[in-house]
Amino acid sequence: MNSIQATVLVVDDEPLQLELHTAFLEAAGYQTLRATNGQQALTLLQKDPAAIDVILSDVAMPEMDGYAFCEQVRAHEETKNTPFIFVSALTNLEEKLKGYDAGGNDYVTKPIEAEEMLEKIKHVIDCREKLASQEQQLAESFNAAMQAMTYSSDLGQILEFYKNSLNAHSFEELAGYLFQTMAAYGLRCTLHIETLNGPIDIGDSGPVPPLEKNVIELARQKTRFYDFGVRTIINYEDFSLLVKNMPVDDAERYGTFKDTLGTLCNAIEARVKVLLSDDANRQKAQVLETVRQALGKIGDSFGNIQKANLQAIEGMVDDLDNAIMNLGLTDNQENQIRDIAVKCYEQVDKIFDEGLTLNNEVEILDKRLTEIFADIDQ
């Protein structure tokens, strides 16, 4: 602030001194306001506290002296930091201590020397500007520190979620840990996951309404962060997170949440992929187990059929021998019938051997399935 912009409130009950002081100030480029007593000066201050940059006040005034006036100025929030310079012919230590205790910034002795007064006024204005700058820097540093503390706290919540998510063996358990973390932020949400059996939606407050499910499905075609009103949908390959109450009125916190939620979703993604892989392996294992059981049944059935066929053929040969003895056939006829039976027996025996080969193939396949199961379990 230069001198042309600064306004000095001059307070003195002596008209001559009042005129003299204002003349010095205006000649130096300052704007001035005048008051002949403390009460009048307080009235001017109350009208527009920000319009007055410096107060130059006489000490010895009737009704309210300069010290009492200064105490009144310091008692009000709007003027507690307004630079205050006393003017007095009394320069002893006791008087200056009174001025200091009242809240004054400096002291000008009578008779006033214009250069000294102007220098002191310039000095208190410079000090006030430096103080204002320091207060702004302090406020900015405080805000930055608070943001850092908040972000640190947010990271702590995310690390806790990372740790807990390792114990999640289902999508429902993972959602439960997520809802705990989001509740700590004061946020409500719904988790949508694209599973092998189709999408599932898990809400933090119970069943997810059909319209909400539909909105999430449609929003999955949008950008990573899709904002609408107080809601934000964060889309990843295998899942989407709907946040229902983002702090849109607090731009700073809103931006911090965006960063935090991005990090949180990276943690969700890591666990979702593991659970999807586990789910896929379980389904493969179920299919393999079904095939294995079917092969076992086929092998058992085939063995039983082979055994029954062999018994039937052997029974047929015995029956033929008995029948031949009772039919009174010639030797040639008996030999022809026996040749037919032997030939049939040999063909069945060949088929039986082929069946054993097939049964061995089934056993090899069953062994391979057992090895696959062992790999899945690992």
Image: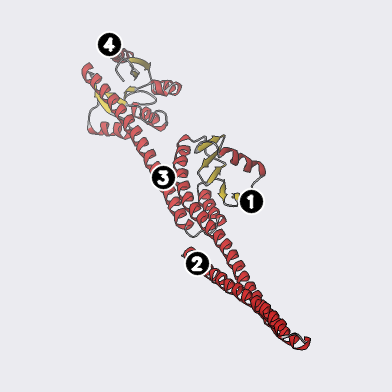
> What separation in Å lies between label 1 and label 2 (alpha carbons)?
45 Å
User: Percent position (x, y) of residue 331?
Assistant: 71, 85
User: Percent position (x, y) of residue 51?
Assistant: 39, 20
The nearer-to-camera label among 2 and 4 is 2
The kind of secondary structure element at disc 1 is: loop
What is the three-letter code of the residue carrying label 3?
Tyr
> What separation in Å lies between label 2 and label 4 (alpha carbons)?
106 Å
The kind of secondary structure element at disc 4 is: helix
User: Percent position (x, y) of residue 232?
Assistant: 54, 39
What is the three-letter code of the residue carrying label 1?
Gly
> How dense is the environment of label 3, judged by Cα within 10 Å: few (below 14), some, or many (20 and up)?
some
The nearer-to-camera label among 1 and 2 is 2
> What separation in Å lies between label 1 and label 3 (alpha carbons)?
30 Å
What is the number of the mark on residue 368? Answer: 2
User: In the picture shown, does residue 4 fall above or below 240?
Assistant: above
Identify the image quadrant of residue 97.
Answer: top left
Where is mark 3, residue-wise? 151
Residue 377 in sight here: yes
Label 1 close to label 3 by CB (< 8 Å): no
> How dense is the environment of label 4, judged by Cα within 10 Å: few (below 14), some, or many (20 and up)?
few
